[in-house]
Amino acid sequence: MSARTWFITGSSRGFGREWAIAALERGDSVAATARDTGSLDDLVERFGDRILPLKLDVTDRAAVFDAVETAHRRFGRLDVVVNNAGYGQFGLIEEISEAEARAQFETNVFGALWVTQAALPILREQGSGHILQVSSIGGISAFPNIGIYNASKWALEAFSQSLAQEVAGFGVKVTLIEPGGYSTDWGGSSAKHAAPLAAYDEFREQAAEARKARIGSPGDPVATREAVLKVVDAEHPPLRIFFGDGPLRTATADYESRLAEWREWEPVSIEAHGKKD
C-alpha cells in the first residue's frame, strides 16, 4: 500500500495526536493542526519533514482554507481528512448561555464544515479520499448535562450522512467515528462548564452518577490507533463505527425505545396524514 497523506485537526492531544502517530509510524505523512504547534515539537523531531505542523483555529474559515491549501502544496495530495478538533460543553439546557451555545457549534459543527468544504475540491479532483468525522455516542443519543454538545454532534452526523451520498460518485468516502468514554482530556481541562443553577443541583449529581455507570471503564486512546488504520484501509469503510466497548449497548437500548414509541403512536401518525386520494 502506498503512503498516504493525512490532514488532522486537533492534533495536540487525544485522538488527533494518537492517529497522527499511527499514520507517521507506518510511513504516511501528516499535516497536523493545533492551536499551539509547540505541542507537536516532539513529533517533528521524531518524524522530520513527514509531519507539517500548522497553527489553526478551525472556527476561522479563511484560515482553514489556507491551511488545507498549504498542506496540499507541501505533500501534493490529501488522502485522509480527519475532523477531530472539538470540545465538550457541560451544562443543563437552561444553564447554557447564548455565547456558549454559539461557540460550541462554531467549533464542533462549523469547524468541521469548513475543513470538509476546503478539502472536497482536492479530493474530487483526485477521484479519491476519505473524510473521518469524529462524532460521539452522544451524536446518536443524548444525555443530560451535555445537551448542547449532543446537539452539535447530531448536526455533524446529519450533514455527514448527506455528504456521504453527495460525494460517493467522486470516489470520496465518509466515516463517522463515534467513540464512547475514553481516557482523554475531553472532560478535563479542554471542557467548558456553564454556570450552574441551584434548582438543578440534585439532578446534576444524579446525571453525573449515571454517566459514570454508563461509561464504566474508559477506553485506552492508544488502542484506537490500529482501529483507525483498519477503517481507512478498508475497501468499503463504514459510514458509522463505534469506538469502544459500550456504545452499541447504549445505542441499541435507545433505538429500540424509539421504535417502540413510534409504533405505539403509529395510529395517530397515520391519522395526521389525512385522507388518502
Image (cartoon, rainbow, N blue to C red):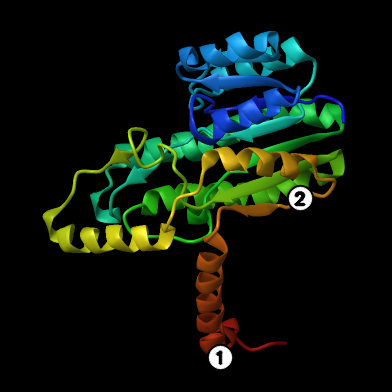
The answer to whether residue 53 is left or right of residue 70 is: left
Q: Quadrant of residue 270?
A: bottom right
Of 131 and 184, which appears nearest the observer? 184
The answer to whether residue 271 is left or right of residue 234 is: left
Of discs 1 and 2, which sits in the foreground? Answer: 2
Marks 1/2 in contact by CB < 8 Å: the verdict is no
Task: Give the class, few, some or many, for how many residues have Cα within 10 Å of label 1's Cα (few <14, many ≥20).
Answer: few
Task: Give the class, few, some or many, for how many residues have Cα within 10 Å of label 2's Cα (few <14, many ≥20).
Answer: few
Mark on residue 225? none
Residue hosting label 2: 165
Nearer the N terminus, badge 1 or badge 2?
A: 2
Secondary structure of the residue carrying tag 2 is: helix
In the rendered image, which quarter contains the N terminus?
Answer: top right
Give the residue displayed 82% in from the left and 50% down from the top: 236
Residue hosting label 1: 267
Label 2 is placed on what type of residue?
A: Gln
Of 64 and 1, which appears nearest the observer? 1
Q: CA distance from mark 1 to mark 2?
A: 32 Å
Q: Quadrant of residue 64?
A: top right
Of 86 and 101, which appears nearest the observer? 86
Secondary structure of the residue carrying tag 1 is: helix
Give the residue displayed 66% in from the left and 13% down from the top: 47
Residue 27: x, y in percent?
76, 22
Q: Could you tell me if residue 65 is visible in this image?
A: no
Residue 13: x, y in percent?
48, 28
Give the residue displayed 36% in from the left and 59% down from the top: 211
Label 1 is placed on what type of residue?
A: Pro
The answer to whether residue 233 is left or right of residue 239 is: right
